[in-house]
Image (cartoon, rainbow, N blue to C red):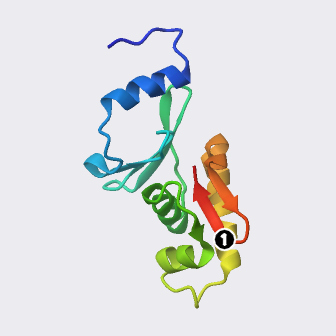
Amino acid sequence: DFLSDGMTEGQLRERLLKHWPADKQAHGMLFSPNRTLRVDLAKREAAVFSRKQWKSLPGLTPKEYDLLCLFLRNPGAELSRERLLDDVWGDALKAHPEAVDKQVGALRKKLGNRGNEIKTVRGIGYKLY
């Protein structure tokens, strides 16, 4: 396969999907369903795919990183605030649900235009599309 100079981001993504392993956790990596978000579990590094290249996301807090991993491990699933509190904070009773909203907002901001892939599910929590 070859890459041409006039290739769009969508065309490049399609070609990459053909060659990447189908398993989203292949080789210690997590990917979003459309392969625009990536986490390297061994290095604890996150990246976004933008303008035909991966761009590192430095500065994620441990909670933001854990939230991103949880979303990537459960694509399309509606995750309640209580589930996020239990899985990321360790105990839903010790933290307030507003802490989830604040951290998800900060994560979305750091993801840039890819932050819109994390949607609010009214009355429930959040979902990664």
The residue drawn where x is 46% and y is 39% is 35
The residue drawn where x is 32% and y is 34% is 20
Taking the view exactly as shown, the residue that stands out farthest to the right is 122
**Percent x, y of residue 2:** 35, 11
Q: Secondary structure at mark 1?
A: loop
Q: Is residue 7 above or below residue 120?
A: above
**Percent x, y of residue 96:** 66, 83
**Percent x, y of residue 58:** 52, 50
Q: Which residue is mark 1?
A: 124
User: Which amino acid is tagged 1?
Assistant: Ile
Query: Which of the 4 image quarters holds residue 81?
Result: bottom right
The residue drawn where x is 46% and y is 50% is 46
Q: Is residue 96 above or below residue 14?
A: below
Taking the view exactly as shown, the residue that stands out farthest to the left is 27
Q: Is residue 6 above or below residue 18?
A: above
Point out the image quarter for the N terminus: top left
Q: Is residue 61 above or below residue 47?
A: below
**Percent x, y of residue 107:** 61, 57
